[in-house]
Amino acid sequence: MTSIAATATCQLGEPARSDPPFASGFARVALTDRVHCARPLPEQVLRIAGRIDAIVVRERDLDDDAYERLARAVAAACDEAGVALIVHGRPAVARRMGLNAVHLPLPQLVEQGRPAGIAWVGTNVHEPDEVELAQRSGADYLMASPIFKPSCKPLAAARGLEFLERVLACARLPVLALGGIDDAAERAVRSTGAAGACRMSGYMLL
């Protein structure tokens, strides 16, 4: 298993590495979904704090101002709970908030490049042949999906553990599994040597 802490050192001109956005062991990461969450996201962070290492504030439908207001509220809860916060898709927001981690969709990472001033950058891969592109584009960790059928996308085809193992075989970076993760699925993911597992509804509906 490749841990987050074992990723490559910074290239010249990048910020010095600060603490990684989640544990170097098996990481548990929550992705937010405020629309279906049982309570306001800051309250939910405190509710699940003992179960997760990091939370990705996804919320792609918000404009930048609304997103930043929400992210700052979630960040306050994360500080209280000892949970890392990862901004999704908006490196400028992360820089204004003084955060060190951003998750970018692969097309955005390829098009815009690794954002300046950000120490840790993650991206998604949906095919094994996307792994090398993500690595060349400057990613520090990968989210492979969908491993199992996600409840939020019932029409999405699950790729299964074989897909995850193929991604792991191609990757020189930590790989997190996403899609349909519950406790049983997490145990199966752990057995592959993946660096962690991510849940959306599994954490938002608790």
Image (cartoon, rainbow, N blue to C red):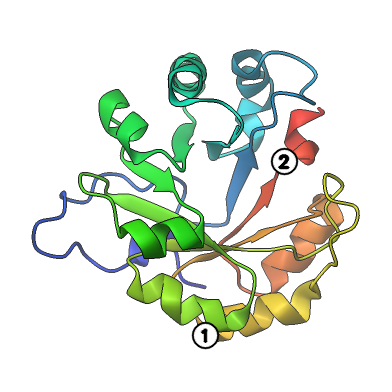
Residue 196 pos. (x, y %): 60, 58
Residue 136, percent from left and from top: 34, 76
> On screen, 135 above or below 76?
below
Mark 1 residue element: helix
Q: Specify the amino acid type for callout 1.
A: Cys
Distance from disc 2 to disc 1, alpha carbons, whole Å, reads 26 Å
- Residue at 71 percent across and 72 percent down: it is 191
* 121 up-or-down from 88: above or below: below
Q: Residue at x 40, y 59 (%)?
A: 109
Horizontal side of residue 59 vs 119, given as left or right:
right
Asked whether 49 or 144 is in front, the reply is: 144
Identify the disc placed on residue 200: 2
Residue 197, given in percent of the width and then of the height, sits at 65, 55
**Considering depth in this image, is 6 or 172 the residue closer to the camera?**
172
In this rendered view, identify the residue nearer to me: 172 or 24: 172
In the rendered structure, the answer to whether residue 122 lies left or right of residue 42 reads left
- Give the residue drawn at x 50%, y 77%: 131
Does residue 109 appear to the left or right of 1 in the view shown? left
Q: Residues within 10 Å of mark 2 (few under 14, many from 20)?
A: many
Q: Which residue is mark 1?
A: 170
Is residue 16 left or right of 1 when viewed as pictured? left
